[in-house]
């Protein structure tokens, strides 16, 4: 398939037009206006039932216009770059303010151009041609099926996207960026009589094409999915109740993302709906626990050079040795509270307003070996692989699906456990950590975080972490 | 805003041009799906407008067949050049895909008949509801929520939105259908202060096609406030196996999770836990589950599905017996059967098998009578988001609700989990309420399940 015949976004969205739209958006008294022009192309292939079922291509391009007065936002967008459509969007956004004076002459644009956190020589979405992608899926399919005769079905898919944007605002910010994402996901279905189980694994991130040969091959991803499915065939039901839990490294960090990270986002801090709003300087996690959000992690889906508001990306320490030291801020909430933006303003596309979002959120490494954390427990649950998770931000209740777990008995992994759910309240979850491993891993391959109907790519991470107790859902009593 | 430029005729004309472009690019068959919509949302917080958002998009999804292999492209550039580019992408992708004789588009004969009565999908009042009125409604919704109880000191926001859209589906085998619809919704999140700085939430609202069908603003406010306040002082209960009363919201969410198990595609792959059970008893005789694409004014209703095949009422489980799986055209051909009209899609993706208006048929008992039957048990009315395994039907959710003794709610409960297996749960349904009410596209009455594991603080 040809590389999309894109005209450079800068030629479709000249500075004079951006300036005109910003003035229109502030014509009724808005204090701040912003335009966000975006071009995105994505492609995917799905291999299943021994067939390349389908290939798909998607293109979207357009401009979102935001006007802000106080804490009030007006937003509208237009598909494409036709100036009249964009002017109409700017006029609609401007209506958030009704009675004010026009915003006056916008500041001259100054380009925000920080160095990239990492560079890609051959971004996978550009360098992997269609035939190579299809070949990778065939290899994944073959590897998963060869793993065990009980593997009945395999689904392998690859998705790539390239996104270019320009963001400009009435404070004079002008920033441009281009971001690449790639992801290969394998699901394997194992059947044994009436038992059926599915295993998943993924690879990818903001990576070079070579990643799939050097770092994580289609075969490695496929074997992980197949092995997980086969293992689960012999897994037992989890015991319901509250007891000690060890959560594995890497993707296990989804726990800190959900049950702590969301409560640190500037919108909930500013509105006071987060319990963390008044806790700066207080102990919110066990001593020895340090929690960071950083958009600078190499090759992660959650990383970037500038955020979607044109603020340079940074590393923000949220908790240092158990003490809450900082929050995450987008422009709107930073401005309303007198804080400095931390580069966490993100949007799903030009059709969405920016929200305050996490990037790569993780717990820093501690002193213990993972083996010691398991060996220390007479009885408990070792959660090796977590699935999805969520938190209800206002009341703090969280839950996670555990896709692969082991019962710990007398310090040893006794038998595999399936379909456990971890639940609790985020208010005290980080205080229930009682030991932190030394095996930090940040999983930037596959995560997507949903908030207010918008999905954003994120990374999560942690070393192996032990909790004094977590409430585990299961059918065994 | 006039609906004309994005009306059925205009979208069908673009669809026809897209089919021409596909043929010119080398497709043997092609299908164009066009979607145009316009919506406006008002969100308020603390008595002020927080956000006004206008959305409007018109997009095309083009599915092509080249020698029995499928390619797909989607975009918003509907100019002649834009269509040609999308068609070229779709055809190039199809040439990489595997041909299969089951891959085909439905013909006009496959499509079936138009509805014999008006589905009433379009409400002029909802389409014309001015932004100012939506702002007023949202402000009123928040104000009434706060006024209902002094323990509600704030909300997490109230929102009112409405919009209208047109969907067109046309293919090279003679199908060409288009229809328009509206939607209007109002939601609020009430926050009640609890001890120790904790907050309890009460979420309530509805989405409807007709403005007149939206519950009164005061009713929405009252229910949201009631839910939040009732949660104050919630605490865990010991781990035990007990009868569980499922609130309609929870039961509907479970029904929604079950959709994959009824999908003919999953059954063909043996990835559904219902795979080998057609014609067998999979639920108690009280259980009848149906999906109806032609409910009058139904939010999920449409005359045709995402491939242009007539929608209908499909009974999936009839008095406990697994009666039917759901199919789109391609998977029906693979399975040697006919589509059930369950191809579900937007214009940005190929069709997949899904439901329109999914529900459990109501029973005879009032929810009060069901509560009164329970001597000791858990009334389950709120849950976390992840906890269902579509391959095994295993069910394990973070749960909130009330501890029940002698037919009465004794105290609110949180910090627990509720777990079971869907097949066991369907068989253990011992009462079905008479309180079926659609507030979105999936609905259920209150259910009583004889036994599930409720996991809490100390093991029982």
Image (spheres, helix red, strand yellow):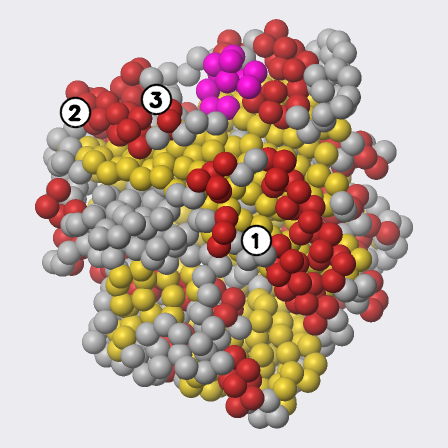
The image quarter containing residue A95 is: top right
Q: Is residue B99 left or right of residue A65?
A: left
Q: Chain of mark 1?
A: A
- Magenta stretch contains residue A82: yes
Q: Chain of mark 3?
A: B
Decide: marks 3, 1 in contact (CB < 8 A)?
Answer: no
Identified at 59% across, 35% down, the residue is: B131
The residue labelled by disc 2 is B23
Q: Position of residue B290 (x, y in %)?
A: 32, 66
Q: Please determine whether, in this image, residue B363 is positioned above or below residue B349.
A: below
Disc marking residue A251? 1
Q: Position of residue B37 (x, y in %)?
A: 43, 34
Q: Position of residue A142 (x, y in %)?
A: 27, 50
Front position among marks 2 and 3: 3
Identified at 19% across, 23% down, the residue is: B20
The residue labelled by disc 3 is B78
Q: Position of residue A201 (x, y in %)?
A: 44, 53
Whole-angstrom CA distance, mark 3 to mark 1, is: 41 Å
The image quarter containing residue B154 is: bottom right
Q: Is residue A271 left or right of residue A184?
A: right
């Amino acid at each position: 398939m040809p590389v999309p015949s894109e005209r450079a976004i800068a030629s479709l969205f000249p500075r004079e037009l951006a300036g005109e739209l910003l003035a229109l958006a502030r014509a009724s008294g808005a204090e701040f206006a912003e335009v966000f022009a975006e071009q995105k192309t994505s492609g995917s292939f799905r291999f299943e039932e021994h067939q390349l079922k389908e290939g798909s291509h998607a293109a979207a391009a357009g401009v979102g216009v935001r006007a802000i007065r106080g804490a009030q936002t007006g937003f509208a967008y237009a598909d494409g770059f036709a100036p009249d459509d964009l002017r109409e969007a700017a006029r609609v956004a401007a209506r958030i303010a009704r009675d004010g004076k026009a915003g006056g002459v916008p500041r001259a644009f100054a380009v925000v151009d920080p160095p990239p956190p990492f560079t890609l020589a051959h971004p996978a979405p550009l360098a992997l041609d269609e035939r190579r992608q299809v070949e990778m899926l065939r290899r994944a399919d073959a590897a998963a099926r060869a793993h065990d005769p009980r593997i009945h079905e395999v689904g392998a898919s690859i998705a790539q996207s390239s996104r270019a944007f320009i963001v400009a605002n009435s404070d004079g910010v002008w920033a441009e960026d281009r971001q690449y994402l790639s992801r290969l996901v394998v699901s394997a279905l194992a059947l044994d009589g009436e038992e059926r189980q599915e295993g998943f694994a993924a690879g990818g991130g903001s990576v070079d094409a070579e990643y799939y040969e050097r770092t994580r091959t289609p075969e490695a991803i496929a074997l992980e999915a197949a092995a997980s499915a086969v293992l689960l065939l012999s897994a037992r039901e989890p015991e319901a109740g509250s007891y000690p839990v060890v959560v594995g490294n890497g993707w296990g960090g989804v726990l800190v993302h959900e049950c702590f990270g969301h409560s640190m986002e500037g919108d909930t801090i500013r509105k006071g709906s987060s319990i963390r709003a008044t806790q700066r300087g207080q102990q919110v996690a066990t001593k020895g626990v340090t929690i960071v959000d950083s958009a600078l992690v190499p090759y992660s889906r959650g990383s970037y050079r500038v955020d979607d508001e044109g603020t340079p990306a940074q590393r923000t320490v949220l908790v240092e040795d158990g003490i809450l030291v900082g929050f995450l801020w987008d422009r709107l909430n930073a401005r309303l509270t007198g804080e400095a933006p931390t580069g966490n303003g993100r949007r799903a596309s030009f059709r969405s307003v920016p929200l305050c979002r996490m990037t790569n959120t993780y717990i820093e490494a501690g002193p213990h070996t993972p083996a010691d954390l398991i060996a220390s427990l007479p009885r408990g649950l070792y959660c090796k692989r977590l699935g999805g998770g969520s938190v209800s931000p206002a009341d703090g209740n969280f839950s996670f699906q555990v896709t692969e777990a082991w019962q710990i008995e007398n310090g040893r992994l006794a038998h595999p456990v399936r379909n456990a759910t971890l639940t609790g309240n985020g208010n005290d979850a980080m205080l229930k950590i009682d030991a932190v491993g030394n095996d930090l891993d940040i999983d930037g391959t596959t995560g997507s975080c949903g908030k207010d109907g918008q999905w954003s790519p994120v990374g999560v991470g942690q070393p192996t972490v032990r909790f004094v107790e977590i409430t585990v859902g299961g059918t065994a009593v | 805003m006039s609906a004309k430029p994005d009306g059925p005729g205009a979208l069908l004309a673009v669809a026809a041009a897209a089919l021409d472009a596909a043929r010119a690019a080398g497709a043997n068959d092609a299908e164009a799906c066009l979607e145009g919509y316009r919506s406006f949302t008002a969100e308020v917080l603390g008595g002020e407008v927080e956000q006004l958002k206008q959305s409007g998009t018109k997009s095309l999804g083009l599915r092509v067949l080249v020698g029995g292999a499928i390619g797909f492209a989607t975009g918003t550039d509907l100019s002649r050049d834009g269509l040609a580019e999308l068609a070229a992408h779709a055809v190039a992708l199809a040439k990489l895909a595997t041909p299969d004789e089951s891959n085909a588009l439905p013909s006009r004969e496959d499509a079936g008949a138009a509805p014999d009565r008006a589905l009433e999908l379009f409400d002029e009042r909802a389409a014309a509801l001015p932004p100012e009125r939506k702002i007023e409604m949202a402000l009123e919704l928040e104000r009434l929520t706060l006024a209902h109880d002094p323990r509600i000191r704030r909300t997490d926001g109230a929102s009112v939105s409405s919009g209208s859209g047109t969907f067109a589906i046309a293919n090279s085998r003679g199908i060409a259908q288009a229809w328009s619809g509206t939607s209007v919704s109002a939601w609020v999140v009430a926050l009640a202060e609890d001890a120790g700085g904790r907050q309890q939430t009460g979420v309530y609202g509805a989405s409807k096609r007709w403005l007149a069908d939206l519950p009164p603003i005061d009713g929405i406010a009252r229910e949201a406030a009631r839910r939040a306040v009732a949660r104050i002082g919630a605490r865990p209960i010991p781990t035990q196996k007990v009868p569980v009363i499922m609130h309609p919201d929870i039961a509907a969410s479970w029904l929604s999770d079950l959709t994959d198990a009824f999908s003919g595609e999953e059954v063909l792959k043996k990835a559904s836990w219902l795979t080998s059970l057609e014609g067998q008893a999979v639920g108690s005789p009280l259980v009848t589950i149906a999906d109806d694409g032609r409910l009058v004014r139904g939010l999920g209703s449409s005359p045709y599905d995402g491939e242009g095949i007539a929608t209908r009422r499909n009974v999936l489980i009839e008095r406990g017996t697994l009666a039917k799986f759901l199919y789109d055209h391609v998977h029906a051909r693979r399975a040697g059967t006919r589509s059930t009209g369950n191809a579900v899609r937007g214009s940005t993706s190929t069709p997949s098998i899904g439901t329109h208006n999914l529900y459990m048929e109501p029973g005879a008992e009032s929810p009060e009578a069901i509560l009164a039957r329970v001597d000791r048990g858990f009334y389950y009315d709120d849950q976390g988001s992840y906890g269902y395994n579509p391959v095994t039907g295993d069910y394990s959710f973070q749960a909130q609700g009330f501890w029940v003794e002698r037919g009465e709610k004794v105290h609110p409960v949180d910090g627990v989990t509720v777990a079971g297996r869907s097949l066991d749960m369907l068989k253990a349904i011992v009462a079905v309420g008479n309180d079926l009410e659609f507030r979105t596209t999936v609905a259920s009455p209150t259910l009583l399940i004889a036994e599930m594991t409720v996991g809490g603080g100390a093991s029982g």
